[in-house]
């Protein structure tokens, strides 16, 4: 039995000033997988290529056991896709948009769609052009969820939303993934929410997968370390160690404790080592603070 909802191997895509990959990435079935990274790391490019928007230069992408290009129609019927870049104004009113999209899905759930519209305060006859940015984002989520797809691809679905709207969207997403066979791949900069919401995290940097794993295990494997260097030692060159702050002989470091980084700090002569756990946001900042 295939245990991966998305399987990416050797994926490459080159642009004028950026190259994605080679990228290997696996999203387990039933997982809520958060794809994070600095701006320009390749998150949207990865999601676009999964959706078949643009041609890859190399590699393979399988979605629910199907080749994403050779079986494109079947793949897209299994995906709910949402992004702030989706523009719906051409349909005029909400009901016209819903009527257009539902025709593509034999499994469209009319009752569920109306329920989502009501819960998210979107009117059936509302003019799309007059909706706020947050409401248009929620409308995109309604369109993505209403055929109850086994896979949700959400590219920055929380961008520009206020706290109330974010809570509403997370409530709907959590309800949608109660079925353990439904999978979510979500790209977002809202790291606090992703730490609570996801069970897997992948961190992209310069088009490469820097770190990947179960969210709790990944975050727990890092520690903030405050220490001193009485002998003037410089720990910045050590593997799995990222400099957060340096003043005189005092250092604040982000350390990956899966290896022997703490032992190497001690052997370098670093003293007064004090460790503390980190949040996903602190891990992210520590990894990329020095660029």
Image (cartoon, helix red, strand yellow):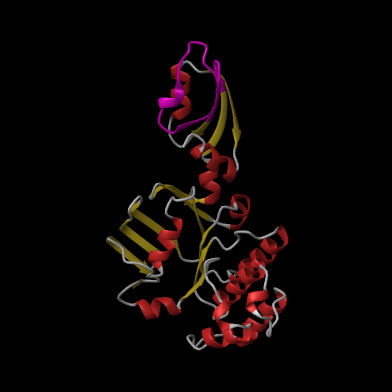
Relative horizontal placement of residue 132, taking residue 31 as reference (left or right): right
Near-viewer residue (245 or 175): 245
Which image quadrant: the N terminus? bottom left
For the view shown, which residue lies furthest in the left direction? 58
Please tell me whether residue 101 is drawn above or below residue 231 in the rendered image: below
- Verify whether residue 236 appears in magenta: yes
The magenta segment: 227-253
Please tell me whether residue 192 is drawn above or below residue 3 in the rendered image: above
Count of numbered labels shown in the rendering: 0
For the view shown, which residue lies furthest in the top direction? 231
- Place residue 118 in its image quadrant: bottom right
- Place residue 133 in its image quadrant: bottom right
Please tell me whether residue 41 is drawn above or below residue 235 in the rendered image: below
Near-viewer residue (73 or 121): 121
Residue 57: percent from left, percent from top: 27, 61
Q: Is residue 3 visible?
A: no
Relative horizontal placement of residue 122, taking residue 249 as reference (left or right): right
Residue 35: percent from left, percent from top: 49, 55
Residue at left offset 53%, top offset 66%: 83
Residue 228: percent from left, percent from top: 55, 17
Residue at left offset 66%, top offset 70%: 135
- Place residue 59 in its image quadrant: bottom left
- Verify whether residue 187 appears in magenta: no
Q: Is residue 50 visible?
A: yes
Residue 21: percent from left, percent from top: 33, 52
């Amino acid at each position: 039995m295939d245990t991966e909802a998305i399987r990416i191997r050797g994926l490459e895509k080159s642009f004028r000033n950026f190259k994605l990959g080679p990228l290997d990435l696996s999203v387990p079935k039933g997982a809520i997988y958060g794809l994070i990274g600095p701006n320009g790391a390749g998150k949207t490019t990865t999601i676009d290529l999964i959706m078949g928007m643009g041609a890859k230069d190399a590699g393979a992408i399988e979605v629910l056991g199907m080749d994403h290009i050779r079986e494109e129609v079947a793949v897209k019927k299994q995906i709910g896709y949402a992004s702030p870049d989706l523009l719906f104004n051409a349909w005029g009113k909400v009901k016209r948009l819903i009527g257009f999209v539902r025709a593509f899905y034999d499994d469209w759930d009319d009752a569920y769609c109306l329920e989502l519209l009501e819960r998210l305060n979107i009117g059936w006859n509302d003019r799309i052009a007059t909706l706020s940015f947050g409401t248009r984002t929620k409308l995109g989520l309604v369109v993505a969820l209403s055929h109850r797809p086994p896979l949700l691809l959400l590219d920055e679905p929380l961008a520009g939303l206020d706290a109330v709207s974010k809570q509403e969207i997370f409530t709907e997403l959590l309800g949608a993934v109660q079925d353990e066979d439904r999978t979510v791949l979500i790209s977002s900069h809202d790291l606090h929410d992703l730490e609570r919401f996801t069970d897997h995290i992948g961190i992209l940097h310069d088009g490469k997968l820097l770190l990947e794993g179960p969210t709790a295990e990944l975050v727990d494997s890092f520690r903030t370390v405050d220490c001193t260097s009485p002998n003037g030692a410089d720990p910045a060159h050590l593997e799995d160690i990222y400099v957060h702050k340096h003043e005189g002989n005092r250092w604040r470091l982000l350390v990956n404790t899966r290896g022997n980084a703490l032992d190497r700090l001690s052997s370098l002569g670093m003293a007064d080592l004090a460790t503390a756990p980190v949040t996903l946001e602190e891990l992210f900042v520590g990894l990329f603070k020095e660029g």
